[in-house]
Amino acid sequence: MITAETIWVIARATGTAALVALVLSVLSGAALRSGALGWLSHNRGVRAVHDLTSVLWIPLMLAHIVALLLDPYAKVGLADLIIPFQVPYGRLAIGLGTISTQLIAVVLLTTWLRSRRTQAGWLAVHRLSYVAFVGAFAHGIMAGTDFAQPMLAALAWVTAAVLGLVAFRRVTAARGRQPATRSRTVAIP
Amino acid sequence: MVGSPRRRPLISSVTVLRLLATGVTALSLGGMTVYASGHLYNTSAPLQPVAPQAATAPVPATVTTTTRSGTGRIQLSPGVPTTTVQPVTKTHRS
């Protein structure tokens, strides 16, 4: 029989591992165009990591949710999976986790149905994964029992900083590719 | 004019990259399982949900002592049993 302690351990371990999978997915996704991981592998390899880690996230997140539903201390109900900010404690922290999970689910669904959507429509939804990652990271920091440990918290913040840099590089790379649409006015003294 | 030669990436094999990504995720899962098993309760955790009823700390049980007086009447009075738990404070001896 699974004890409450075992469920608690599963909830914590799968939550952290799901965040790690999400970090790898967002990192490899952001690096696809910017070439930030060009030193590690070619674009096909980075794309393979992006696709794989997105799929790896699913069972980890499902296990995290099921464990929290079974945990008598967490007091998370089925309705909390749909309607965020309803839990009697830590509403913002847990609600952010709910919203980010829903956003990632939408991003994954639209990716699988990509052939039925326009490229612009798919991209608009896919960019929500950045918002979802910020929500998931905030959820981890604000609700994660293990992120209270300085070492793990430091590791999480360093990872988030690296991810932020790669995302920034992607944005600047995308801007660099856009053709100049406005002429420059130079003031002549 | 010859451009700078493109550097070869560290890992060319897609399979190796997939294994690496799976390994990192599996390592975090395994590592956190071991860590959480060894540190079940974290007093500095940001969320501290109220424990459910069954897991609340037991209220010290009172015992009822009965004393028989000389008049033949039984007098009942509540009392506290002696604990078997070791004291957590010490008395300084000089």
Image (cartoon, rainbow, N blue to C red):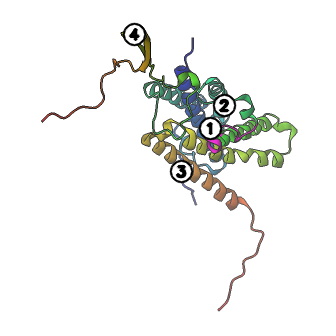
Viewer-side label of 2, 4: 4
Measuring from the top left, give residue B35's x and y in whole percent: 45, 28
Residue extending farthest to the bottom is A189
Determine whether B59 is above or below B71 in the image.
below
Give the number of marks.
Answer: 4
Q: Chain of mark 3?
A: A
Circle 3 sits on which residue? A161
Between A20 and A187, the residue placed more toward the observer is: A20
**Residue found 61% across the figure and 55% down from its top:** A168
Mark 4 touches mark 1? (CB < 8 Å) = no
Q: Which residues are magenta?
A: A83-94
Between B79 and A50, the residue placed more toward the observer is: B79
| Disc on the earlier residue, 2 or 3 | 2
Q: Secondary structure at mark 4?
A: loop
Viewer-side label of 3, 4: 4
Residue A76: mark: 2
Report if residue A17 lies within the magenta region: no
Q: Chain of mark 1?
A: A
| Residue type pointed to by label 3 | Ala
Residue extending farthest to the right is A116
Q: Do discs 2 and 3 share a chain?
A: yes
**Residue found 75% across the figure and 64% down from its top:** A179
| Disc on the earlier residue, 1 or 3 | 1
Q: Secondary structure at mark 1?
A: helix
| Residue type pointed to by label 4 | Thr
Circle 1 sits on which residue? A22
Residue B71: mark: 4
